[in-house]
Image (cartoon, helix red, strand yellow):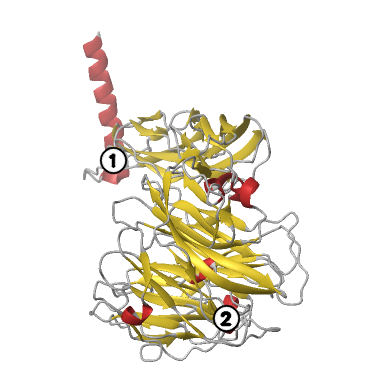
Amino acid sequence: MKSSNMLSLCFTSFLLFSCGGGGDSSNETTTPPTPTNVAPTANAGIDQSVNEEVVVTLTGTGSDSDGSVSSYLWSQVTGTTISLADSSNASTTFTAPTLTASTTLTFELTVTDDDGSTGKDTVDIVISPVNLAPTANAGSSQSVEEQSLVTLMGSGTDSDGTITSFSWLQSSGANVALSDSLTASATFIAPLLVEEATLTFELTITDNEGTSNQDSVDVTVLPIVTPDPIELNYSLLRPNGYVPLENVDEISNTAYSIPEATISIDANNDGLNDLLLGPTNYAAEPELALVLFINQGDGKFIEDAAGVIDNVPLVGYLNHPSLVADFNGDGADDAFLVDQGLEVGSPPFVGHQPILLLSNNEGGLINASESHLPMLTEFHHSASVGDIDLDGDLDILGVTLSELSVYILINDGKGNFSLRTEGLPEDIVSELANKDIGAITLAHVNNDKRLDIVFGTYHNAPTLQVFVALQDENGNFVESQTLTFTQTYEKAGIDLLLAADLDGDGDDDVIGKMDISSLPGEENTTEGGLTLFALRNDNGMYTNVTETWLGGGVVSELLPNPNISGLYLQDINGDDHLDLLFANSGIELNQLGHYLYINNGKGQFFPAKNTSVDSDLSISPQWYMDHDNDGDMDIVAMWPDVTIVDGKYISTGYEIIVLERE
């Protein structure tokens, strides 16, 4: 059945074919058209929302209706650039970036079929930041003494970012002023207290995504407890006896010497400290010579200026501090004496050339005031010694109550000095010229090995102030700090500044003395005032710590007191801490605590006590020296036999006495 059907079909087809076309018997064929390729379809997957720092998988697919998919390719279209693990697979991965705000990343998937056609699709990945809060650490609790410098040591960590800011605030306790409160380590000065108190501080830290955290710390402030007086035992020696003065009429109106006009110096280079005095003369006449007492080593001192030092006349009187140092480099003591001039009448006063005494290698001193110094005939008031230009020898910084104001004497290493006035802080020197700077000292303020300058204003200045000027690498001095005293005075001024490391932290602190006595013809009051002050160096900035450093008996015994003349810093008790020593007029020997104050190593001074000297003999001046070279600091003093006639001081004799340390 299937076969017949086939024959009939063939026959019929043959008949049809042979009947058309008028007998043309040629054969014709037709090529079918090439089919069109259908592009593949890409599917980049569904949109996603993920957190930062997670692994994201892009799952793509592709299909081809008339063939097959031969390749895949992922690419990033928009958003923060990331790195795809394998962009040539249907599925790939990447790590979501760390962000501070939500963002969208768009990716495109391209699929290619076996005929080279492509299809594309995109997918959006929304990434949101997930921030972990930082951790704040305000540091450990502290216990500190009042008026000490306190450092708050904070820190912060952030596991998923960085710390961008710190902020300290006080949350309880007596208010203090925070310095560097926007740093990890803030500082403040502990307040003065009458009883123990706790201060609380809060540290807030913020990370790079704006999330904050807090921590707090307590600081307990302890009042300083004044210890019992420190006992120093001395024996009273009087081997010299009373020495009457001749020609009393010629030295009327003249005390034999005042404390500020005395120095200890090995004048004859025999290893023993001798005594050098500048007789005090407030009148125009007569001129008086220096007086030198040679130490015999057994407590005896013999006046012998003629054999050791040539005659050096004074026009006025020596004003402290006189400087003893090796200026000419021969290993022996030299001296620079600040010869003030004549303080007679009203300012401006008559000045005088300072006195330079240089050792002569023959057991004596020569007067080199004119041969080795420039002419400086202004009214001098203070001086300080140090290697200002860092060349290995000692230079001199001085101040006058005149338009010259501050000056520097540069040493050539052999005791020859040249005048230098350039490089000084013009804003201080020019503003305070002509009697406004009364005291000056060199100090290591910022520990850069270069000496800096501390200035103190005098009577003519409108306010009592201390100025600090730092020396730069070019040798110029630039003002860095000004401290103003709030006490009220009538015509008071700062007339002495001493710089040394008093609290053992390696930088120079400052002890200062105020002159609260009247200038001629002027009224003055000391009520509510201090004649001494203490400035602690806190990382190159000074803080007034008078109440705590000088409060342990100094204030109650001595302040205010217009009779403080000499002021010294020496280790009197051999504990390697500089103590505070006074040279007052009319001190009684049995009142040792009135002029010796022991440093506890923190810059706090407390009165000494002496129970072995039972004498109310008044002395003036005093020297603090090891008179017998036994390693102990002794006290050598002068008892002046002075009477007052018609308001004038008349010295008729003296006695040198020794307090020998036991």
- Image coordinates of residue 100 in percent, x first then y, are 52, 40
Locate residue 129, reporting x and y percent.
51, 34
Q: Are marks 2 and 1 in contact (CB under 8 Å)?
A: no
Which SS class for mark 2? Answer: helix
Nearest the viewer among 219 and 552 is 552
Q: Amino acid at mark 2?
A: Ile
Instruction: Using a 10 Å C-alpha cutoff, classify the residue at mark 2 as few (fewer than 14 neighbours), some (14 to 19) or many (20 or more).
Output: many
* Residue at (38% x, 41% y) in the render: 82
Question: How many residues crowd around disc 1 within 10 Å: few (fewer than 14), some, or many (20 or more)?
Answer: some
- Residue 117 visible to an observer of this rendering: yes
Q: In the rendered image, which residue does mark 2 sit on?
A: 251
Dividing the picture into quadrants, the one containing residue 361 is: bottom left
Instruction: Name the quarter where the N terminus is drawn.
Output: top left
Q: Residue at x 40, y 91 (%)?
A: 370
Depth check, mark 2 against mark 1: the one in front is 2
From where the camera sits, is residue 507 visible? no
Question: Residue visible at 64% across and 69% down?
Answer: 643
**In the image, residue 238 lies at what x, y percent?**
42, 56
Tag 1: amino acid? Asp
Against 178, residue 343 (above or below) is: below
Label placed on residue 115: 1
Q: Is residue 178 above or below residue 126?
A: below
